[in-house]
Image (cartoon, grey):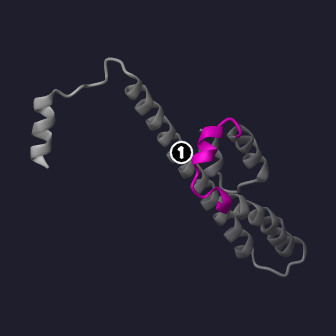
């Protein structure tokens, strides 16, 4: 919820990002499953450099248009969306794997096929 609330703000700030990025360290299994972790880390570094640079060019130097800074805030929103999607997918995979391991260990959910059911399944294929 915290990430979504910072995602929907009209002007994102690094303070909002710092709050929920500090909580991401609690998700170590999910971070290992992220597919684009290197891309997210490098793009965050680039956005942290370009954001203040574009603001400086627009406000202090008056050499740039406000659209340059606005495009950086849009890219920052896209970055946050990609991070949220990756974390949700990794969490779903982690929960699915945990449920699969519980079923393999045994319990009432485990179904054992009889020999006639196994033969019927082979015929269907």
Q: In percent of the image, x 31 and y 22: which residue is there?
A: 109
Q: In percent of the image, x 66 and y 56: which residue is there?
A: 10
Q: Is residue 20 above or below residue 78?
A: above
Q: Would you say residue 105 sits in the magenta stretch?
A: no
Residue 2 percent coordinates (x, y): 64, 39
Quadrant in which the N terminus appears: top right
Residue 108 percent coordinates (x, y): 31, 17
Q: In percent of the image, x 14 and y 40: which residue is there?
A: 121
Q: Is residue 95 above or below residue 17?
A: above
**Which quadrant holds residue 120?**
top left
Residue 27 percent coordinates (x, y): 64, 38
Out of 15 and 20, give the one closest to the viewer. 20
In the orientation shown, which residue stands out farthest toward the right? 60
Magenta stretch in the rendered image: 25-39
Q: In percent of the image, x 73 and y 75: which residue is there?
A: 68
34 left or right of 70 in image: left
Helix, strand or loop for disc 1 = helix
Q: Is residue 87 above or below residue 111?
A: below
Q: Would you say residue 29 sits in the magenta stretch?
A: yes
In this rendering, the count of numbered labels is 1
Out of 13 and 22, give the one closest to the viewer. 22
**Which quadrant holds residue 76?**
bottom right
39 left or right of 116 in image: right
Out of 38 and 75, give the one closest to the viewer. 38
Residue topped by disc 1: 90
């Amino acid at each position: 919820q915290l990430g979504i609330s910072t995602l929907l703000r009209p002007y994102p700030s690094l303070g909002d990002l710092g709050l929920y990025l500090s909580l991401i360290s609690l998700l170590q299994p999910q971070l290992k499953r992220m597919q684009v972790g290197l891309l997210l880390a490098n793009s965050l570094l680039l956005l942290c450099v370009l954001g203040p640079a574009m603001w400086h060019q627009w406000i202090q130097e008056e050499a740039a248009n406000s659209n340059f800074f606005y495009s950086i805030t849009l890219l920052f929103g896209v970055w946050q969306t990609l991070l949220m999607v990756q974390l949700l997918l990794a969490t779903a995979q982690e929960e699915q794997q945990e449920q699969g391991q519980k079923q393999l260990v045994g319990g009432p959910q485990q179904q054992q096929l009889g020999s006639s059911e196994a033969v019927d399944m082979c015929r269907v294929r």
